[in-house]
Amino acid sequence: MQWGAGIGVAMTGCSKTEKTAAVEEEGPSQLGATIRAYGERSPHEKSARFLPDTKTPEAASSRTPLADSHGIITPNGLHFERHHSGVPTIDPAAHKLLIHGLVSNPLMLTMGELKRLPSVSRVHFIECAGNSRSEWGTKGAPDVRQSHGLASCSEWTGVLLSVLLAEAGVQAKAKWLIAEGDDPCHMQRSIPLSKALDDIIVAYGQNGESLRPEQGYPLRLVVPGYEGNINVKWLRRINVTDQPGMVKDETSKYTELLGDGKARIFTFEMDAKSVITYPSGGHQLEGKGFHQITGLAWSGRGRVETVEISTDGGKTWKKAELQEPRHRMAFTRFRLGWTWDGGEAVLVSRCTDETGYTQPTRDDLIAVRGKNSDYHCNATKPWMVSADGKVTNA
Ligand SMILES: Nc1nc2c(c(=O)[nH]1)N[C@H]1C(S)=C(S)[C@@H](COP(=O)(O)O)O[C@H]1N2
Ligand SMILES: [Mo]
């Protein structure tokens, strides 16, 4: 579908005289609001994270309303949250990062010292391994906030962990590191040294400002493409070791029970995934004719290469347009023009990443992983458009 002339969308037109009169009548008659020190969004904007009904909000998650966002960046106030023991209050002036273990020169760094070091800013998604858990079942979640909202994407700023490890002098027998948070559960995760030397960011910045408390203020790990849990927030300690810690969050949790009763452990990369965010569950199409189908795709293994869209439940496919820039391990925005004929339609997207891996259907995924699975569901997600324009989970 080409843009420009011929989209044929039903827009309300008006004559030139009507337009001039309207502008003259409606012009502001008094001065607007004053300047302010920290901006707020318009009171007309109501988009919000989805909060589950739980008795333990300290050990819960809130979900990003993906259908409301434009482009690929998640606004800081809408980044999903997942914490296991609440959001700690940390004074950055007192916060320190310890790097010790199999290093020749252990380091204890203040926030000030970290900020003096060479920094990078990179766009990456973070996705909880439990995202889209609902889609293993036959029912599926009713809207994209609930089905895919445990994923968000930001520009993160900080120091590459490889820089800090070079300062600390990693010993030859080192193979892993164990990262630890400064929240009451002291969350720990083991990370292969090879990843740490590659692209992990010790981040203090999120979309141009300091991390939000929910995202780990003042310091967190951003581990590009790896499951959310490993992105340790409120980072206070990195212990360099020769073996993984086999800690709570990689044994009792964040493992996947397969069909044969064996469990996968250390499923680090998030598999390629895409979802249509418009039209999606809960939307109401205003009428027949032109609509722009749009959504988000991402892969824990690199760049998104292709997104295809079907409007007939997967029988036929068309290539979507991908918005540039396409960062590695980041949300990629896709679009396709669609003329709705007013009949029933089932919309679904599937993506392929730079490794050639294509997002599976739910049936394909179950064939490989069995039905015991809980984490790491990356199945395609169909939405049903009814003749009355209502969009529901298909
Ligand atoms: N210290 C600490 N780090 C943590 C967690 C936590 O509870 N404590 N939760 C993890 C989980 S399960 C996920 S999915 C991500 C979520 O990051 P976000 O809250 O910034 O979206 O943080 C991870 N890092
Ligand atoms: Mo998570």
Image (tube, helix red, strand yellow):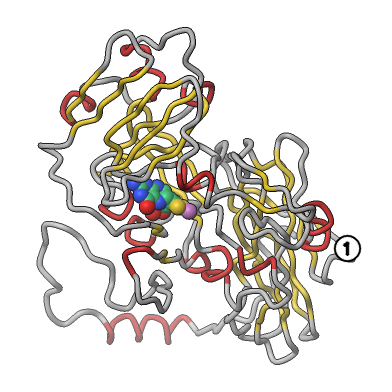
Q: Quadrant of residue 205?
A: top left
Kind of residue indicated by mark 1: Thr
Residue 321 is at least partly visible in this image = yes
Task: Pick the residue in front: 362 or 316.
Answer: 362
Outermost residue toward the right in this view: 315
Residue at 53% x, 71% y is: 146
The answer to whether 205 appears left or right of 140 in the picture is left
Task: Pick the residue in front: 80 or 169.
Answer: 169
The answer to whether 342 appears left or right of 217 in the picture is right
Residue 207 is at least partly visible in this image = no
Residue wearing tag 1: 316
Q: Is residue 94 above or below residue 60?
A: above
What x and y, as percent, mark residue 116?
A: 21, 22
SS assignment at label 1: loop
Q: Is residue 120 above or below residue 182?
A: above
Residue at 66% x, 72% y is: 291
What x and y, as percent, mark residue 345?
A: 79, 78
Task: Pick the residue in front: 183 or 284.
Answer: 183
Residue at 27% x, 15% y is: 106
Residue at 75% x, 89% y is: 387
Q: Quadrant of the N terminus?
A: bottom right
What x and y, as percent, mark residue 228?
A: 48, 48
Q: Quadrant of the C terminus?
A: bottom right
Callout 1 crowding tier (Cα within 10 Å): few <14, some 14–19, many ≥20:
few
Task: Pick the residue in front: 197 or 289.
Answer: 197
What x and y, as percent, mark residue 139?
A: 69, 78
The answer to whether 183 appears left or right of 309 in the picture is left
The verdict on label 1 being within 8 Å of ligand 1 is no
* Badge count: 1
